Image: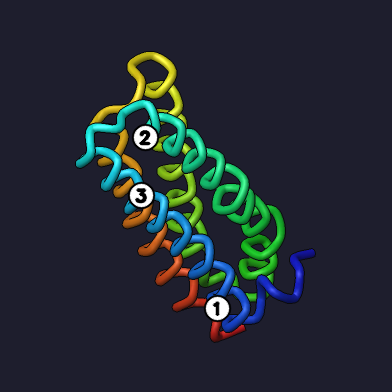
């Protein structure tokens, strides 16, 4: 069973916005470090960004999939395709985080890592929007 916060659209939205805003801030810091050619510091912050995605956003996605999404489909079977799409969004986020980690470990920080971090924000923003679209009905 999912927590009450996950089913209440306002609190759920607040969870999403806080985590996404933190990710945006980390990306902004990385952009400034890149502009100042501080690649060692950028590498350090990139690892912090990965940890943020793993502990805040992907852990939240896991909780949604393990509880909320199952409950939504049980209550409203017509939402199954929406839930499949939301889960696919989470899979894309997981894939990108894995790619970023591998790149950091093998190549260090580079422009491609920053681009993938920006992509994570866009995919997550879309996922949040779509999720919140179906939540008000429950």
Compared across the picture, whether 9 is left or right of 89 comes to right
Q: How is the image coloured?
A: rainbow
Marks 1 and 2 sit apart, C-alpha to C-alpha, by: 37 Å
Sequence order check: which comes first, mark 1 or mark 2? 2
Q: How busy is the neighbourhood of tag 1: few (under 14 within 10 Å), some, or many (20 plus)?
A: some
Q: How busy is the neighbourhood of tag 2: few (under 14 within 10 Å), some, or many (20 plus)?
A: many
**Who's the residue at 56% across and 75% down the image?**
14
Give residue 134's position: percent from left, percent from top. Answer: 49, 77
Sequence order check: which comes first, mark 2 or mark 3? 3
Q: How busy is the neighbourhood of tag 3: few (under 14 within 10 Å), some, or many (20 plus)?
A: some
Q: Secondary structure at mark 3?
A: helix
**Who's the residue at 69% across and 67% down the image?**
71
Give residue 25's position: percent from left, percent from top. Answer: 40, 57
**As drawn, 138 above or below 34:** below
Q: Residue furthest left?
A: 35
Give residue 11's position: percent from left, percent from top. Answer: 62, 79
**As drawn, 58 above or below 36:** below
Q: Secondary structure at mark 2?
A: helix
Marks 1 and 3 sit apart, C-alpha to C-alpha, by: 33 Å
**Who's the residue at 45% across and 27% down the image?**
101
Disc assigned to residue 120:
none
Sequence order check: which comes first, mark 1 or mark 3? 3
The residue indicated by pointer 2 is 42
Q: Find residue 123 and report its image quarter.
A: bottom left
**As drawn, 86 above or below 138:** above
Give residue 109's position: percent from left, percent from top. Answer: 33, 27
Q: Secondary structure at mark 1?
A: helix
Compared across the picture, whether 116 is left or right of 101 comes to left
Q: Which quarter of the rendering shows the N terminus?
A: bottom right
The residue indicated by pointer 1 is 135
Please report contact status of discs 1 and 2: CB closer than 8 Å, yes or no: no
Disc assigned to residue 29:
3
């Amino acid at each position: 069973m999912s927590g009450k916060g996950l089913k209440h659209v306002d609190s759920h939205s607040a969870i999403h916005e806080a985590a996404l805003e933190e990710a945006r801030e980390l990306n902004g810091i990385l952009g400034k470090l890149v502009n100042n050619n501080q690649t060692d510091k950028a590498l350090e912050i990139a690892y912090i960004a990965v940890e943020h995605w793993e502990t805040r956003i992907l852990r939240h996605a896991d909780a949604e999939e393990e509880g909320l999404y199952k409950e939504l489909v049980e209550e409203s079977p017509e939402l199954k395709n929406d839930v499949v799409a939301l889960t696919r969004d989470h899979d894309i986020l997981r894939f990108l985080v894995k790619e970023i980690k591998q790149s950091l470990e093998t190549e260090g920080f580079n422009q491609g890592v920053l681009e993938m971090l920006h992509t994570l924000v866009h995919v997550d923003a879309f996922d949040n929007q779509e999720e919140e679209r179906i939540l008000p009905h429950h």
